[in-house]
Image (tube, grey):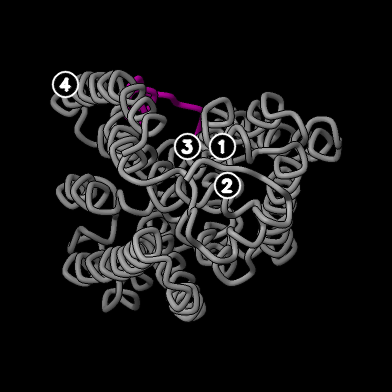
Amino acid sequence: MSELETKFTTELYPLRRRALAVGALALGLCLAGFFTDREQFFRSYLIAYMFWLGIPLGCLGIVMIHHLVGGTWGFVIQRSLESAIRTFPILAVLFLPLLFGLPDLFIWAHPQAVAQDPVLLQKAAYLNIPAFIVRAALYFTVWFALGYFLSRWSAEQDRSADPALTQRLQTLSGPGLVLYGLTVTFSAIDWLMSLEPHWYSTIFGMLFMVSHGLIALTFVIGVAYFLSRREPLSRIIAPWVLHDLGNLLLAFVMLWAYMSFAQFLIIWVENLQHEIPWYLHRINGGWGVIAVALIVLQFSLPFILLLSRTVKRKAGTLCAVAAAIALMHQIELFWFVAPTFHPDGFSLHWTTLLAPLGIGGLWFAAFLGQLRDRPLLPFRDPRFIAIVEEQGWVPHG
Protein backbone atom coordinates (compact mmCIF):
# COMPACT_ATOMS: atom_id res chain seq x y z
CA MET A 1 0.00 0.00 0.00
CA SER A 2 1.37 3.40 -1.01
CA GLU A 3 1.91 6.29 1.37
CA LEU A 4 -1.09 8.15 -0.08
CA GLU A 5 -3.35 5.11 0.32
CA THR A 6 -2.16 4.56 3.89
CA LYS A 7 -2.89 8.20 4.73
CA PHE A 8 -6.36 7.98 3.18
CA THR A 9 -7.16 4.78 5.08
CA THR A 10 -6.04 6.41 8.33
CA GLU A 11 -8.34 9.37 7.68
CA LEU A 12 -11.35 7.07 7.26
CA TYR A 13 -10.99 5.30 10.63
CA PRO A 14 -12.41 8.10 12.84
CA LEU A 15 -15.16 8.84 10.32
CA ARG A 16 -16.17 5.19 10.26
CA ARG A 17 -16.20 4.99 14.06
CA ARG A 18 -18.42 8.06 14.29
CA ALA A 19 -20.82 6.61 11.71
CA LEU A 20 -21.06 3.37 13.67
CA ALA A 21 -21.65 5.25 16.93
CA VAL A 22 -24.39 7.43 15.44
CA GLY A 23 -26.05 4.44 13.78
CA ALA A 24 -25.98 2.29 16.90
CA LEU A 25 -27.30 5.09 19.12
CA ALA A 26 -30.12 6.07 16.73
CA LEU A 27 -31.22 2.47 16.20
CA GLY A 28 -31.09 1.89 19.94
CA LEU A 29 -33.46 4.81 20.50
CA CYS A 30 -35.71 3.56 17.70
CA LEU A 31 -35.82 0.18 19.41
CA ALA A 32 -37.24 1.96 22.46
CA GLY A 33 -39.91 3.31 20.12
CA PHE A 34 -40.67 -0.27 19.08
CA PHE A 35 -41.85 -1.06 22.59
CA THR A 36 -44.07 2.02 22.77
CA ASP A 37 -45.51 1.95 19.23
CA ARG A 38 -44.67 -1.20 17.31
CA GLU A 39 -46.57 -0.28 14.15
CA GLN A 40 -44.96 3.15 13.87
CA PHE A 41 -41.52 1.67 14.39
CA PHE A 42 -41.87 -0.58 11.34
CA ARG A 43 -43.29 2.26 9.22
CA SER A 44 -40.34 4.49 10.08
CA TYR A 45 -37.91 1.63 9.54
CA LEU A 46 -39.36 0.90 6.10
CA ILE A 47 -39.01 4.53 4.98
CA ALA A 48 -35.41 4.71 6.17
CA TYR A 49 -34.50 1.32 4.76
CA MET A 50 -35.83 2.10 1.29
CA PHE A 51 -33.81 5.32 1.23
CA TRP A 52 -30.48 3.67 2.01
CA LEU A 53 -31.19 0.62 -0.14
CA GLY A 54 -31.73 2.99 -3.06
CA ILE A 55 -28.09 4.11 -3.01
CA PRO A 56 -26.40 0.75 -3.72
CA LEU A 57 -29.23 -0.20 -6.09
CA GLY A 58 -28.72 3.00 -8.04
CA CYS A 59 -24.96 2.48 -7.94
CA LEU A 60 -25.42 -1.00 -9.38
CA GLY A 61 -27.36 0.38 -12.32
CA ILE A 62 -24.95 3.27 -12.93
CA VAL A 63 -21.82 1.09 -12.82
CA MET A 64 -23.31 -1.25 -15.43
CA ILE A 65 -24.22 1.73 -17.62
CA HIS A 66 -20.66 3.00 -17.20
CA HIS A 67 -19.18 -0.33 -18.31
CA LEU A 68 -21.37 -0.27 -21.40
CA VAL A 69 -20.84 3.35 -22.49
CA GLY A 70 -17.52 4.35 -20.87
CA GLY A 71 -16.77 8.02 -20.16
CA THR A 72 -14.35 9.79 -17.87
CA TRP A 73 -17.12 10.66 -15.41
CA GLY A 74 -17.57 6.95 -14.70
CA PHE A 75 -13.94 6.29 -13.83
CA VAL A 76 -13.96 9.14 -11.30
CA ILE A 77 -16.87 7.59 -9.36
CA GLN A 78 -16.31 3.92 -10.24
CA ARG A 79 -14.71 2.99 -6.91
CA SER A 80 -17.48 4.71 -4.97
CA LEU A 81 -20.07 2.83 -7.03
CA GLU A 82 -18.34 -0.49 -6.47
CA SER A 83 -17.89 0.15 -2.75
CA ALA A 84 -21.62 0.83 -2.43
CA ILE A 85 -22.69 -2.33 -4.26
CA ARG A 86 -20.49 -4.42 -1.96
CA THR A 87 -22.74 -3.38 0.94
CA PHE A 88 -25.66 -5.56 -0.20
CA PRO A 89 -24.89 -8.23 2.45
CA ILE A 90 -25.38 -5.80 5.33
CA LEU A 91 -28.54 -4.47 3.69
CA ALA A 92 -29.85 -8.02 3.45
CA VAL A 93 -29.29 -8.36 7.22
CA LEU A 94 -30.96 -5.00 7.87
CA PHE A 95 -33.96 -6.19 5.82
CA LEU A 96 -34.69 -9.02 8.26
CA PRO A 97 -36.46 -6.86 10.91
CA LEU A 98 -39.05 -5.92 8.29
CA LEU A 99 -40.07 -9.57 8.00
CA PHE A 100 -41.24 -9.46 11.61
CA GLY A 101 -43.32 -6.38 10.87
CA LEU A 102 -45.23 -7.56 7.80
CA PRO A 103 -48.60 -7.71 9.63
CA ASP A 104 -47.94 -4.20 10.96
CA LEU A 105 -47.31 -2.83 7.48
CA PHE A 106 -49.39 -4.77 4.96
CA ILE A 107 -53.10 -5.48 5.16
CA TRP A 108 -52.66 -8.48 2.88
CA ALA A 109 -50.61 -10.14 5.65
CA HIS A 110 -53.86 -10.56 7.66
CA PRO A 111 -55.78 -13.69 6.53
CA GLN A 112 -59.06 -12.39 7.96
CA ALA A 113 -58.82 -9.14 6.00
CA VAL A 114 -58.00 -11.04 2.82
CA ALA A 115 -60.97 -13.36 3.28
CA GLN A 116 -63.35 -10.38 3.47
CA ASP A 117 -61.92 -8.43 0.52
CA PRO A 118 -62.58 -9.69 -3.06
CA VAL A 119 -59.66 -7.66 -4.47
CA LEU A 120 -57.21 -9.11 -1.96
CA LEU A 121 -58.54 -12.59 -2.63
CA GLN A 122 -57.73 -12.16 -6.32
CA LYS A 123 -54.17 -11.08 -5.46
CA ALA A 124 -53.62 -13.61 -2.67
CA ALA A 125 -51.55 -15.95 -4.84
CA TYR A 126 -48.98 -13.18 -5.18
CA LEU A 127 -49.47 -11.14 -2.01
CA ASN A 128 -48.80 -13.61 0.77
CA ILE A 129 -46.02 -13.87 3.32
CA PRO A 130 -44.18 -16.99 2.00
CA ALA A 131 -44.14 -15.65 -1.57
CA PHE A 132 -43.03 -12.22 -0.31
CA ILE A 133 -40.05 -13.75 1.50
CA VAL A 134 -39.06 -15.96 -1.46
CA ARG A 135 -39.16 -13.00 -3.84
CA ALA A 136 -37.13 -10.85 -1.46
CA ALA A 137 -34.49 -13.58 -1.26
CA LEU A 138 -34.44 -13.74 -5.06
CA TYR A 139 -33.98 -9.97 -5.38
CA PHE A 140 -31.04 -9.92 -3.01
CA THR A 141 -29.50 -12.95 -4.68
CA VAL A 142 -29.56 -11.21 -8.07
CA TRP A 143 -28.22 -7.93 -6.66
CA PHE A 144 -25.51 -9.66 -4.68
CA ALA A 145 -24.44 -11.83 -7.65
CA LEU A 146 -24.26 -8.89 -10.06
CA GLY A 147 -22.38 -6.75 -7.56
CA TYR A 148 -20.03 -9.57 -6.65
CA PHE A 149 -18.87 -10.30 -10.19
CA LEU A 150 -18.68 -6.65 -11.24
CA SER A 151 -16.54 -5.85 -8.22
CA ARG A 152 -14.46 -9.04 -8.39
CA TRP A 153 -13.51 -8.66 -12.05
CA SER A 154 -12.68 -5.00 -11.52
CA ALA A 155 -10.37 -5.97 -8.66
CA GLU A 156 -8.77 -8.68 -10.79
CA GLN A 157 -8.05 -6.09 -13.44
CA ASP A 158 -6.31 -3.94 -10.81
CA ARG A 159 -3.98 -6.86 -10.13
CA SER A 160 -3.47 -8.31 -13.59
CA ALA A 161 -4.18 -5.45 -16.04
CA ASP A 162 -5.91 -8.04 -18.23
CA PRO A 163 -7.85 -6.16 -20.97
CA ALA A 164 -10.13 -9.19 -21.45
CA LEU A 165 -11.76 -8.36 -18.13
CA THR A 166 -13.17 -5.16 -19.63
CA GLN A 167 -15.04 -7.24 -22.20
CA ARG A 168 -16.24 -9.55 -19.44
CA LEU A 169 -17.62 -6.58 -17.46
CA GLN A 170 -19.42 -5.28 -20.53
CA THR A 171 -20.85 -8.69 -21.35
CA LEU A 172 -22.32 -9.01 -17.87
CA SER A 173 -23.67 -5.45 -17.77
CA GLY A 174 -26.06 -5.88 -20.72
CA PRO A 175 -28.23 -8.71 -19.34
CA GLY A 176 -27.45 -7.43 -15.84
CA LEU A 177 -29.41 -4.26 -16.56
CA VAL A 178 -32.38 -6.37 -17.64
CA LEU A 179 -32.28 -8.35 -14.39
CA TYR A 180 -31.77 -5.11 -12.50
CA GLY A 181 -34.87 -3.57 -14.07
CA LEU A 182 -37.04 -6.58 -13.30
CA THR A 183 -35.93 -6.98 -9.69
CA VAL A 184 -36.17 -3.27 -8.86
CA THR A 185 -39.66 -3.11 -10.40
CA PHE A 186 -41.00 -6.07 -8.46
CA SER A 187 -39.30 -5.05 -5.21
CA ALA A 188 -40.93 -1.62 -5.45
CA ILE A 189 -44.29 -3.30 -6.00
CA ASP A 190 -43.78 -5.68 -3.07
CA TRP A 191 -42.30 -3.30 -0.52
CA LEU A 192 -44.09 -0.04 -1.27
CA MET A 193 -46.96 -0.28 -3.73
CA SER A 194 -48.56 -3.19 -1.90
CA LEU A 195 -48.95 -1.01 1.20
CA GLU A 196 -52.21 -0.05 -0.53
CA PRO A 197 -53.00 -3.22 -2.50
CA HIS A 198 -56.16 -1.81 -4.10
CA TRP A 199 -54.03 0.78 -5.92
CA TYR A 200 -51.58 0.11 -8.72
CA SER A 201 -49.50 1.99 -11.25
CA THR A 202 -47.66 0.52 -14.21
CA ILE A 203 -45.05 3.31 -13.96
CA PHE A 204 -44.26 2.73 -10.29
CA GLY A 205 -41.31 0.38 -10.81
CA MET A 206 -39.74 2.60 -13.46
CA LEU A 207 -40.17 5.61 -11.20
CA PHE A 208 -38.17 3.87 -8.51
CA MET A 209 -35.45 2.81 -10.93
CA VAL A 210 -34.99 6.46 -11.81
CA SER A 211 -35.20 7.50 -8.15
CA HIS A 212 -32.51 4.98 -7.20
CA GLY A 213 -30.25 6.31 -9.94
CA LEU A 214 -30.90 9.87 -8.79
CA ILE A 215 -30.12 9.25 -5.11
CA ALA A 216 -27.06 7.13 -5.98
CA LEU A 217 -25.69 9.90 -8.17
CA THR A 218 -26.19 12.51 -5.44
CA PHE A 219 -24.31 10.25 -3.03
CA VAL A 220 -21.29 9.57 -5.26
CA ILE A 221 -21.08 13.28 -6.15
CA GLY A 222 -20.78 13.96 -2.42
CA VAL A 223 -18.07 11.32 -2.11
CA ALA A 224 -16.27 12.77 -5.13
CA TYR A 225 -16.35 16.20 -3.50
CA PHE A 226 -14.83 14.71 -0.33
CA LEU A 227 -12.12 12.95 -2.34
CA SER A 228 -11.47 15.82 -4.77
CA ARG A 229 -9.10 17.45 -2.28
CA ARG A 230 -7.11 14.25 -1.82
CA GLU A 231 -4.64 12.42 -4.01
CA PRO A 232 -4.99 10.90 -6.54
CA LEU A 233 -8.45 12.25 -7.41
CA SER A 234 -7.33 15.85 -6.96
CA ARG A 235 -5.33 15.39 -10.20
CA ILE A 236 -8.27 13.89 -12.09
CA ILE A 237 -11.42 15.76 -11.04
CA ALA A 238 -11.22 18.67 -13.47
CA PRO A 239 -14.09 21.17 -13.93
CA TRP A 240 -15.22 19.46 -17.12
CA VAL A 241 -15.48 16.12 -15.30
CA LEU A 242 -17.73 17.76 -12.69
CA HIS A 243 -19.66 19.29 -15.57
CA ASP A 244 -20.35 15.79 -16.95
CA LEU A 245 -21.55 14.59 -13.53
CA GLY A 246 -23.76 17.67 -13.26
CA ASN A 247 -25.26 16.98 -16.68
CA LEU A 248 -25.96 13.39 -15.67
CA LEU A 249 -27.61 14.60 -12.45
CA LEU A 250 -29.72 17.04 -14.48
CA ALA A 251 -30.81 14.21 -16.78
CA PHE A 252 -31.94 12.10 -13.81
CA VAL A 253 -33.79 15.07 -12.28
CA MET A 254 -35.66 15.63 -15.53
CA LEU A 255 -36.42 11.93 -15.95
CA TRP A 256 -37.71 11.71 -12.37
CA ALA A 257 -39.98 14.70 -12.97
CA TYR A 258 -41.25 13.21 -16.23
CA MET A 259 -42.04 9.82 -14.66
CA SER A 260 -43.69 11.39 -11.61
CA PHE A 261 -45.84 13.73 -13.68
CA ALA A 262 -46.77 10.98 -16.15
CA GLN A 263 -48.01 8.77 -13.32
CA PHE A 264 -49.97 11.63 -11.75
CA LEU A 265 -51.48 12.81 -15.05
CA ILE A 266 -52.64 9.36 -16.18
CA ILE A 267 -54.25 8.54 -12.85
CA TRP A 268 -55.80 12.00 -12.43
CA VAL A 269 -57.32 12.04 -15.92
CA GLU A 270 -58.69 8.51 -15.63
CA ASN A 271 -60.26 9.44 -12.26
CA LEU A 272 -60.94 5.82 -11.37
CA GLN A 273 -62.31 5.05 -7.94
CA HIS A 274 -59.59 2.52 -7.09
CA GLU A 275 -56.72 4.78 -8.25
CA ILE A 276 -57.47 8.42 -7.48
CA PRO A 277 -57.67 8.10 -3.63
CA TRP A 278 -53.92 7.38 -3.53
CA TYR A 279 -53.22 10.92 -4.71
CA LEU A 280 -56.11 12.48 -2.79
CA HIS A 281 -54.59 11.18 0.43
CA ARG A 282 -51.28 12.82 -0.54
CA ILE A 283 -52.51 16.28 -1.48
CA ASN A 284 -55.03 16.87 1.32
CA GLY A 285 -54.73 17.31 5.08
CA GLY A 286 -51.30 18.94 5.06
CA TRP A 287 -49.68 16.35 2.78
CA GLY A 288 -50.11 18.74 -0.15
CA VAL A 289 -47.39 20.98 1.30
CA ILE A 290 -44.90 18.14 0.83
CA ALA A 291 -46.18 17.56 -2.72
CA VAL A 292 -45.51 21.19 -3.61
CA ALA A 293 -42.10 21.06 -1.90
CA LEU A 294 -41.16 18.04 -4.00
CA ILE A 295 -42.09 19.87 -7.19
CA VAL A 296 -40.11 22.96 -6.21
CA LEU A 297 -37.10 21.49 -4.40
CA GLN A 298 -36.61 18.15 -6.13
CA PHE A 299 -37.27 19.38 -9.65
CA SER A 300 -37.77 23.09 -10.33
CA LEU A 301 -34.91 24.60 -8.30
CA PRO A 302 -32.34 21.85 -9.07
CA PHE A 303 -33.34 22.02 -12.74
CA ILE A 304 -32.70 25.77 -12.86
CA LEU A 305 -29.43 25.53 -10.94
CA LEU A 306 -28.09 22.62 -12.96
CA LEU A 307 -28.63 24.53 -16.18
CA SER A 308 -25.83 26.80 -14.99
CA ARG A 309 -22.37 25.92 -16.25
CA THR A 310 -20.87 27.61 -13.17
CA VAL A 311 -22.85 25.49 -10.71
CA LYS A 312 -21.86 22.25 -12.43
CA ARG A 313 -18.17 23.12 -12.62
CA LYS A 314 -17.71 23.95 -8.93
CA ALA A 315 -17.49 20.90 -6.70
CA GLY A 316 -18.92 22.66 -3.64
CA THR A 317 -22.03 24.06 -5.33
CA LEU A 318 -22.70 20.84 -7.23
CA CYS A 319 -22.41 18.90 -3.97
CA ALA A 320 -24.85 21.30 -2.27
CA VAL A 321 -27.43 20.77 -5.02
CA ALA A 322 -26.95 17.00 -4.77
CA ALA A 323 -27.40 17.10 -0.98
CA ALA A 324 -30.66 19.03 -1.34
CA ILE A 325 -31.98 16.48 -3.85
CA ALA A 326 -31.02 13.61 -1.52
CA LEU A 327 -32.89 15.24 1.38
CA MET A 328 -35.97 15.70 -0.77
CA HIS A 329 -35.82 12.05 -1.84
CA GLN A 330 -36.00 11.03 1.81
CA ILE A 331 -39.02 13.30 2.22
CA GLU A 332 -40.54 11.82 -0.94
CA LEU A 333 -40.34 8.32 0.54
CA PHE A 334 -42.01 9.62 3.70
CA TRP A 335 -44.73 11.09 1.45
CA PHE A 336 -45.16 7.73 -0.29
CA VAL A 337 -45.54 5.70 2.92
CA ALA A 338 -46.93 7.82 5.76
CA PRO A 339 -50.27 8.90 4.16
CA THR A 340 -51.15 5.22 3.81
CA PHE A 341 -51.57 5.11 7.57
CA HIS A 342 -52.55 8.77 8.14
CA PRO A 343 -54.80 9.70 5.18
CA ASP A 344 -56.69 12.37 7.13
CA GLY A 345 -53.74 14.63 7.89
CA PHE A 346 -50.03 15.17 8.26
CA SER A 347 -48.31 13.09 10.95
CA LEU A 348 -44.62 12.86 11.81
CA HIS A 349 -43.23 10.55 14.49
CA TRP A 350 -39.84 10.96 16.12
CA THR A 351 -38.76 7.49 15.00
CA THR A 352 -39.16 8.67 11.39
CA LEU A 353 -36.37 11.16 12.05
CA LEU A 354 -34.09 8.74 13.90
CA ALA A 355 -34.45 5.63 11.74
CA PRO A 356 -32.56 7.12 8.73
CA LEU A 357 -29.69 8.04 11.04
CA GLY A 358 -29.63 4.54 12.51
CA ILE A 359 -29.67 2.56 9.29
CA GLY A 360 -27.59 5.20 7.53
CA GLY A 361 -24.87 5.18 10.16
CA LEU A 362 -24.41 1.42 9.90
CA TRP A 363 -24.58 1.43 6.11
CA PHE A 364 -22.16 4.34 5.75
CA ALA A 365 -19.66 2.66 8.05
CA ALA A 366 -19.85 -0.45 5.86
CA PHE A 367 -19.39 1.69 2.76
CA LEU A 368 -16.28 3.37 4.17
CA GLY A 369 -14.88 -0.03 5.05
CA GLN A 370 -15.26 -1.09 1.43
CA LEU A 371 -13.93 2.20 0.03
CA ARG A 372 -10.64 1.97 1.86
CA ASP A 373 -9.90 -1.55 0.55
CA ARG A 374 -9.36 -0.62 -3.10
CA PRO A 375 -7.38 1.99 -5.06
CA LEU A 376 -9.48 5.09 -5.67
CA LEU A 377 -9.00 4.89 -9.45
CA PRO A 378 -9.00 1.92 -11.87
CA PHE A 379 -5.39 2.51 -12.86
CA ARG A 380 -5.10 -0.65 -14.99
CA ASP A 381 -8.34 -0.41 -16.94
CA PRO A 382 -7.21 0.09 -20.57
CA ARG A 383 -10.02 2.58 -21.18
CA PHE A 384 -8.87 4.69 -18.25
CA ILE A 385 -5.23 4.41 -19.33
CA ALA A 386 -6.20 5.73 -22.77
CA ILE A 387 -7.99 8.71 -21.21
CA VAL A 388 -5.03 9.47 -18.93
CA GLU A 389 -2.65 9.45 -21.90
CA GLU A 390 -4.99 11.60 -23.98
CA GLN A 391 -5.43 14.22 -21.24
CA GLY A 392 -1.81 14.16 -20.13
CA TRP A 393 -2.71 13.36 -16.51
CA VAL A 394 -0.15 11.90 -14.12
CA PRO A 395 -2.28 10.02 -11.55
CA HIS A 396 -0.73 8.11 -8.71
CA GLY A 397 -0.64 4.41 -9.45
**Considering only order in the chain, which callout, 4 or 3, is on the residue closer to the N terminus?**
4
Q: Secondary structure at mark 1?
A: helix
Q: Nearer the viewer, residue 334 or 327?
A: 327
Kind of residue at badge 4: Ala
Up the image or down, 98 lies above or below 171; here it is above
Residue 210 shown in magenta:
no
Mark 1 Cα shell of 10 Å, populated few (<14), some (14-19), many (≥20): many
Which of these two is toward me, 219 or 331? 219
Can residue 116 be seen in the rendering of this structure? no
Estimate the spatial distance between the alpha carbons at disc 2 and disc 3, rounded to whole Å.
Answer: 32 Å
Q: Is residue 114 left or right of residue 218?
A: left
Q: Nearer the viewer, residue 12 or 265?
A: 12
Residue wearing tag 4: 32
Q: Quadrant of the N terminus?
A: top left
- N-terminal of the two: label 2 or label 4? 4
Coordinates of residue 307 in the picture (x, y in percent):
85, 40
Where does the image place residue 389, in percent across and percent down from the top left? 67, 56
Checking the image for residue 217, the label placed there is none
| First in residue order: circle 2 vs circle 1 | 2
Q: Which mark is residue 334?
A: 3
Identified by mark 1, the residue type is Leu
Q: Which residues are magenta?
A: 344-357
**Residue located beneath label 1 in the image:** 233
Disc with the residue nearer the chain's start (1 vs 4)? 4
Q: Nearer the viewer, mark 2 or mark 3?
A: 2
Q: Position of residue 273 (x, y in %)?
A: 58, 62
Q: CA distance from mark 1 to mark 4?
A: 43 Å
Magenta residue check for 353: yes
Q: Nearer the viewer, mark 1 or mark 4?
A: 1
Number of the front mark, 2 or 1: 1
The residue under label 2 is 76
Residue 124, position as x, y percentages in the image: 27, 74
